Image: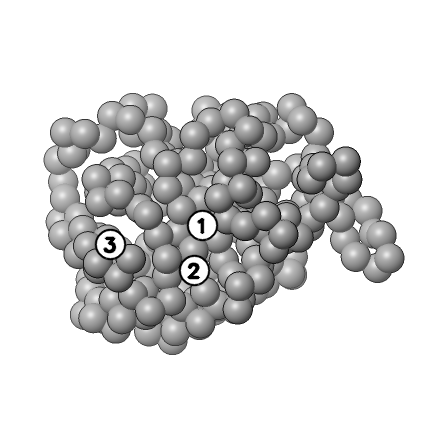
Amino acid sequence: MYYRVLVLILVMFFSFGLISKPSHASSDVNVIVLWTDDGRLKAATLMCVKPESERTGVIAVPRYVQVPLGEMYVSVEEYYSLQGRDSLISLLENKFDFTIHSYVSIEQKAVEYTSRILGEILVGEDTTTVVDAFEGTLQEIRRDDQAVVQALARRLFQPDALIRLPYLTYVFMTNIETNFRERDVLTVFWAVRSHGVDTMKKRAVPGEDYFVDGQKVRFVEDEAWELVLQEVTG
């Protein structure tokens, strides 16, 4: 696993200078990013890159979204805890009716360390940190999820971020687990640089929100999963 993460970082590094389209960058790439804290799921986010249509979409799946488990419904967070990563990925593939090619599992410590290494980011007219921006969107204090994603993407592509690459490499190798294929990493970075971060769309899976025993839950209609996918990639 450490080898794969190291190769991923090296591919990211060299793709910063990539101008021409990779020969293999014609197929869609769908990646799920799982943000965990000591094994507990905090957030699940899908990144969908469509090179041919020059679209990059990001879909947030809040941890309180209800999904079926046997004859009952549980939150995405509970489903992950009970069934594990692979089962959750399979469930989401069925819901969105598409294939998730890779996963990236990021521990809370990696988010905190990355935030310190990258320093402040500019979200609109607001200067903040990566961890504060992420926590704010997670707790729904911030409502500018798309602007946060775009701001982070811009920060990662700034030249001075390359100087900090050795530190980021260590953080990623010790706090990230992934099966991200190197060719897909190259496609994603080429697409984001080529299409521009401002074209990226981010939406959360929509539904009806309720409070049950003081806990927020969201019920999502079956057709809403595919509709939000079409919205961010269409």
Indicate how the structure is coloured in the image: one colour
Q: What residue is pinned by disc 3?
A: 4
Mark 3 in CB contact with mark 1 (< 8 angstroms): no
Location of residue 223 with respect to 49 vertically, above or below: above
Amino acid type for the residue under numbered disc 2? Ile
Tell us which disc is closer to us: 3 or 1: 3
Give the crowd class for mark 3: few <14, some 14-19, many >=20 residues within 10 Å: some
- Residue 100: x and y in percent read 42, 35
Q: What residue is pinned by disc 1?
A: 33
Q: Quadrant of the N terminus?
A: bottom left
- Residue 117: x and y in percent read 33, 73
**Between marks 1 and 2, how big is the CA–CA gap?**
7 Å
Location of residue 192 with respect to 229 vertically, above or below: below
Q: Residue at x 53, y 69 (%)?
A: 38
Disc 2 element? strand
Amino acid type for the residue under numbered disc 3? Arg
The residue closer to the viewer here, 167 or 103, is 103
Amino acid type for the residue under numbered disc 1? Val
Q: Which numbered circle lies on residue 8?
A: none
Disc 3 element? helix
Taking the image as shown, residue 40 lies to the left or right of residue 195, namely: right
- Residue 179: x and y in percent read 33, 48
Taking the image as shown, residue 45 lies to the left or right of residue 219, namely: left
Question: Which residue occupies the extreme right position in the image?
Answer: 213
N-term-proximal mark, 2 vs 3: 3
N-term-proximal mark, 3 vs 1: 3
Tell me, yes or no, if residue 9 can be seen here. no
The residue closer to the viewer here, 159 or 190, is 190
N-term-proximal mark, 1 vs 2: 1
Taking the image as shown, residue 69 lies to the left or right of residue 32, namely: right
Q: Residue at x 55, y 29 (%)?
A: 94
- Residue 85: x and y in percent read 50, 48
